[in-house]
């Protein structure tokens, strides 16, 4: 209703999430006590993740923090963690621009604010778009060397296959491609992105990884590998975003280990 009112005379039904939020919270508390309230088709971890996402969406839905202003300029959109990781590995912004045809579909920005955009599809291959997926925007009005704002798809509206509108929340002004080194993949690693601080919206760096690849408990230490060379220790502090596509964690650079005392 905040985006489009129903047509006059339409029979509109409304529902409240209050009761279902209370039930989901009860289920989550039961899982924490290792007493599942219903037969589990999958493991406890997946069930817990699902309940936590439902509580976030139904119990505490996101709200816009800033008013949107109407705009009308074109830009390219790169969708998906895998494609975005490959794009950002290209060191030169000019080379990234040459790769635009392979990585970007064409959109028009219809409104924007300090923390988000609304975009309407023009042409190209948008790929498989899903709410909760990560994207990078390359405004055509910007100079070639400008960074790509990184954001999450918050909603998708499509009345026909040719008409697609999406809402994007900005997470950072750039991202750093990296590999997450885990015991399961000590050599290959998991493709991930580091989102630098974006004050005043985000005061800490964040780590973006494919969904369900790491547990993500607080105070967990992991290694990052950049360009296959030096490895940097980070510490996961908390999960701030979970979707079917990816997980986003608040991270901090782990302090170096104290030197061993000499005998």
Image (cartoon, grey):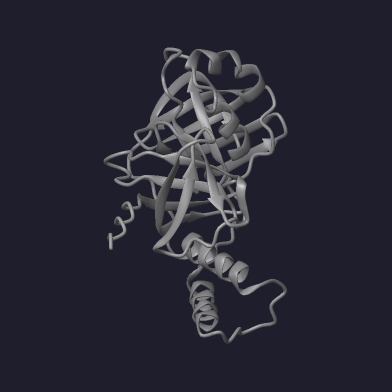
**Residue nearest the observer in this picture, 170 or 262:** 262
Taking depth in this image into account, of 42 and 154 the one nearest to the observer is 42
Give the side of residue 201 with respect to residue 62, left or right.
Answer: left
The quarter in which the C terminus is drawn is bottom left
Q: Report the number of discs.
A: 0
**Which residue: 54% across, 28% down?**
89
Q: Nearer the viewer, residue 31 or 155?
A: 31
User: Left or right: 40 with respect to 16?
Assistant: right
Q: Vertically, is 144 above or below 233?
A: above
The correct choice, above or below, for 87 with respect to 44 in the image is above
Question: x and y percent of residue 195 in the render?
Answer: 42, 40
On the image, the x and y values in percent for residue 51 come to 55, 69
Q: Which quarter of the picture shows residue 54?
A: bottom right
Residue 205, image x, y percentages:
37, 45
* Foreground of the two, 7 or 210: 210
Q: Quadrant of residue 20?
A: bottom right
Q: Is residue 50 left or right of residue 65?
A: right
In the rendered image, the vertical position of residue 83 relative to residue 219, given as above or below? above
Q: Residue at x 45, y 34 (%)?
A: 175
Q: Residue at x 57, y 27 (%)?
A: 87
Q: Is residue 137 left or right of residue 186?
A: left
Q: Is residue 231 above or below residue 53?
A: above
Of all residues, the one furthest to the front in this rendering is 263
Position of residue 24 measured from the top left corner of the image (x, y, whole percent): 53, 74
């Amino acid at each position: 209703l905040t985006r489009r009112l129903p047509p006059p005379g339409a029979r509109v039904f409304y529902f409240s999430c209050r009761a279902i939020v209370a039930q989901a919270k009860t289920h989550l508390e039961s899982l924490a006590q290792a007493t599942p309230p219903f037969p589990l088709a999958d493991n406890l971890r997946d069930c817990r993740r699902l309940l936590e996402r439902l509580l976030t969406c139904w119990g505490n839905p996101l709200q816009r923090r800033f008013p949107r202003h109407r705009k009308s300029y074109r830009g390219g959109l790169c969708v998906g963690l895998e494609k975005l990781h490959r794009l950002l590995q290209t060191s030169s912004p000019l080379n990234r621009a040459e790769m635009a045809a392979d990585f970007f579909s064409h959109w028009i920005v219809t409104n924007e604010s300090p923390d988000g955009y609304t975009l309407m599809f023009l042409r190209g291959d948008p790929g498989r778009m899903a709410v909760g997926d990560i994207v990078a925007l390359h405004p055509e009005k910007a100079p070639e060397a400008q960074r790509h704002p990184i954001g999450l798809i918050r909603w998708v509206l499509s009345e026909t296959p040719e008409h697609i509108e999406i809402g994007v929340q900005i997470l950072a002004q750039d991202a750093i491609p990296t590999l997450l080194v885990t015991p399961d993949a000590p050599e290959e690693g998991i493709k991930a992105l580091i989102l630098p601080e974006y004050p005043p919206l985000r005061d800490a760096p964040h780590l973006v990884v494919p969904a369900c690849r790491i547990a993500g408990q607080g105070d967990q230490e992991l290694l990052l590998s950049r360009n296959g060379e030096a490895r940097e220790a980070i510490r996961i502090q908390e999960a701030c975003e979970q979707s079917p596509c990816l997980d986003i964690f608040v991270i901090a650079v782990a302090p170096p280990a104290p030197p061993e005392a000499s005998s």
